[in-house]
Amino acid sequence: MSDRIPATTDKKPSPQADIINIHTLSVYVNNQPGVLGRICNVFSRRGFNIESLVVSQTRNPRFSRMTIGISGHPEGLHQIIMQVSKLIDVIHCQEHTDRDAVSKEMVLVKIAAGPENRTEILQIVGHYNGKTVDLQEDSLICLLSGNTDKLDAAIRLLSKFEIIETIRTGKVVMARGLTDT
Amino acid sequence: MHTPPMDGAQALIKTLADLGIEYVFGYSGGAALPIFDALETVKTNMKFVLVRHEQGAVHMADGYARATGKPAVVLVTSGPGAGNTITGLMTAQMDSVPMIVLCGQTVSWMLGKDAFQEADIFNITQPVVKHNFLIKETNDLPRIAKEAYHIATTGRPGPVLIDIPKDKSQAPFTGTFDEPMDLPGYHPEEALKIDQSSVKEAAKLIAQAKRPIILAGQGAMIARADKELLMLAETLGCPVTTTLLGKGVFPETHPLSLGMLGMHGTAYANKAICEADLIFNVGSRFDDRIIGKPHMFGRNAKLIHVDIDASEFNKMIQVDVTIKGDAKAVLSDLLPLVEKLPTTEWLEHLDTYKKKFPLTYKKQGGLRMQQVIDEFYQLTEGKAIISTDVGQHQMWAAQFYKNDSSYHWLSSGGAGTMGFGFPAAIGAQFACPDKTVISISGDGGFQMTLFELATAAIHKLPIKILILNNSYLGMVRQWQELFFDNRESGVDLLGNPNFVKLGEAYGIKGWHIRRPADVTRILQQALDYNDGPCIIEAECIKHENVFPMIPAGAALEDMITEAPKHKMEKPTGST
C-alpha cells in the first residue's frame, strides 16, 4: 500500500507467503459509524492483517458492503468468520474464492515517461485493456482493471520504466450466478 | 390523554423502568446530570444505589445478574467515570453476564475535541462489550434502550453500553415509546431452532459410550437447563463435572457429581476426563483453565459440544459433533433419543478415585482457609449465595463450598478480576434480600474495592464479609514457590490494615478468627447477625498451596495432587 516500492520487489513473495494465504471476505453490515472498527478489532486481536479493504454503501443505503482481503494462517479463519458474523452490526460474513465468485480490482500507475518510451508503455497498457487517464510532457497515469494476477503481470511488465507510484483499490468480489454475495 | 413534555433522559428512565429494571448502580457527574435528574422526576419503581467508585457499580450489577439472571443498570458520567467501568465490563463480557451501562458524554458538538471529561468510550469499550451505542438522536433513546436490553439478555448474554451526549439527554423528547427494535444482524431466536441431524449424531455417539462424562458450563445455567441436565445424567447413568462458572447447575452433592474440573478441580473429575471415551460438553467454552494442553484434551474420547455461540466451536479443540443452540432446547431434543448406558463399572472406577483423592485439608498446625470455607458450608447447609474474589481462596471456595443450585455461585472466571467479589456480593444481596450472601475475599482482592463498605453499611445489607487474610497474594506466591525457586516477588502484603477495625470505621461489626477452634462459633455469630454487614477476618497460615493443580499449559494427565518433591519446570501456558 505504500508508495515508491521498488518495482522489483512488488511481487516478491514474503517468506511466509507460502503458508499464509490471502482470503477474501465479503461482509454485509449496517451502514453506521464504528462498524469497521468492530470488525478490525476481531482481525487484529487474532493476528490477521488486513491487506485490502473496500467499503461502500449498497443499493439500500442503510447497509454497506465490505470486501476485505486478510492474510493469516488458514487455521482459525472459519472461527474468525464466525466471530465477525456474531457482531450485532454484521448481517453476514463469508469467504469467497475465485471458484464461487468473480474478483476484480483496479490500479492507477503513474510512470515518468517522455515521448521516447511513451509508445511502448501505451502498447503494454493497451494489451491489458487499460487506458491512459492523464498524459503530461514527462509523465502519464494509466488505469488498469482486472483480477489480481492480471494487474500484477501488467505492473511487472511496466516496471522496466520508472514507476512513480501505484495505487490499487483492493479487490471487490461478487458471487457467481443467482447466489447473493 | 395529555402527557407532560419529557426530555430524552426522562424517556430513557421510563423505558428502562418499563423493561423491568429494578436497580441502578451508579455515580453521578456533570455529563450525566440530566439522567440523574430524571431518576428523581420520573416516577418508577427503580431503586438507585450510589456507590463509591464506578468499578464497584459495574461489579454490583454483575453480582445482581449472576444471582438472578436479570440485568441491572449502571449509570456513570463521562470520561473517568466511564473509564472506571472498563474492568467491570471486561469481567462481565468474559463471563457472559447481562447488564446495561449508561455513560454520560460531553455535548455532541464537542465530541472529538478533547472537551472536559470527554473520553471516546464508544471506541474504548468495543472489545469488552457485547455491543455498544452512541446516541445521535434524542428520540432514539427508548428504542436503543430496548435494543440494549434485548441484546444484553438474549442469545449469549453480555454487557451493553450506551454513550449519551448531554445535549441528547436533555433535549425535548418528541418521539414514541413503541418504535420497534431495528437489529437486522441479530437473531437470537435461532438458538431455539436445533439442527436435529446433529442431535441424532450426538445420540449415536452417546449410545456407543462406555465411559461417558458430561461437562456442564454456565451456558446450561443461563439456558435454565438444570432439570434437563439432571435427567440426562440420571437417564444415562453418566457422571457430571462442571466448570467454575457452571457450579450449581448440577447438584454437587449428587452421587453422579464429580465437582469442578480443571486447573484446581478435583482429581477425580480430571482423571475422569482423561479416561473418558465420550465428553459431552454442554455450555462450556473449553476454557484454557479446564483443557490444559489443547491437543491432549479428550484425545481418547469422542467430543460433543453444545453451545449457543457458534464461534466457540473448534476454537480451542476440534470436536466430533457440534450442536448450536440453547442448551435447554438441545437437551430436551436429545433426551428422548438416549437410554441408560452400561456405566456401572465406570462409576465404580471413579468412586475409587473419589476415595483415593478426596478434597481434604489439615486441621492442625494453624488456621487454614479451607477450614473456614468448609465450616461456612456446613453451617449454611450449602444454601448461601457465595461471591468470591480471585486467587487461592477462590479455588478453595470452589472446592469446599458445594453448590446444589444455579445462581448461587458468583465468581469472576474468564477475566479473573481481583476486587470483584465484595461488590458483586452487594449486588447479589440487593437482588436477594432474604438469602444469606457470603462474600469471600483474600486480603489482596478485598483491598481493591473495599471502598464499597460504605455502600453495604448505608443499606444495612446483611452480607457476611469473610476476609481470608494470609498477608500474601497467595496464588502468585504459590507459583513462585513451585516454579520460580520460591523467589517471592511482589506478593508480600506487608502493612495490611486491621480489617475489623477498618469495618468499625464504617460502623460495621466484625470478628477476628485466629484459631481453628474458634471458626464454628464465630461464623455462627456472623450468620446470626443480620442488622447489617459484618466482617470476619480470618488470620490464616501464610504458606499453603492449592492442590490438585494442573500447571498452566500442561495436560490434565500431569495433574499434581500434593506438593511436588522436585523442582518443577516453568509452565508453558499463560498464568
Image (tube, coloured by chain):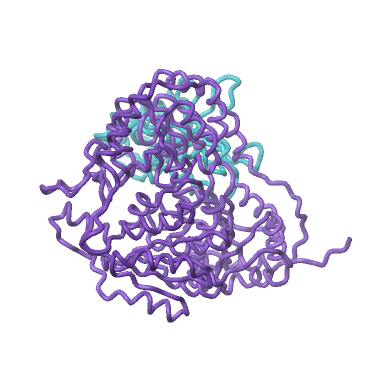
Above or below, comparing residue B334 to residue A91 in the picture: above
Left or right of B129, for residue A2: left
Position of residue A162 measured from the top left corner of the image (x, y, whole percent): 32, 39
Which chain is displayed in cyan in the rendered image? A
Position of residue B133 measured from the top left corner of the image (x, y, whole percent): 58, 54
Residue under the point 55% across and 51% down: B98
Residue under the point 44% across and 40% down: B217
Left or right of B259, for residue B251: right
Residue under the point 51% across and 43% down: B221
Q: Is residue A141 visible?
A: no
Above or below, comparing residue A153 to residue B390 in the picture: above
Above or below, comparing residue B274 to residue B223 in the picture: above
Position of residue B64 measured from the top left corner of the image (x, y, whole percent): 54, 57
Determine the residue located farthest toward the left in the rendered image.
Answer: B566
Position of residue B325 measured from the top left corner of the image (x, y, whole percent): 54, 33
Residue under the point 36% across and 21% down: B210
Q: Quadrant of residue B279?
A: top left
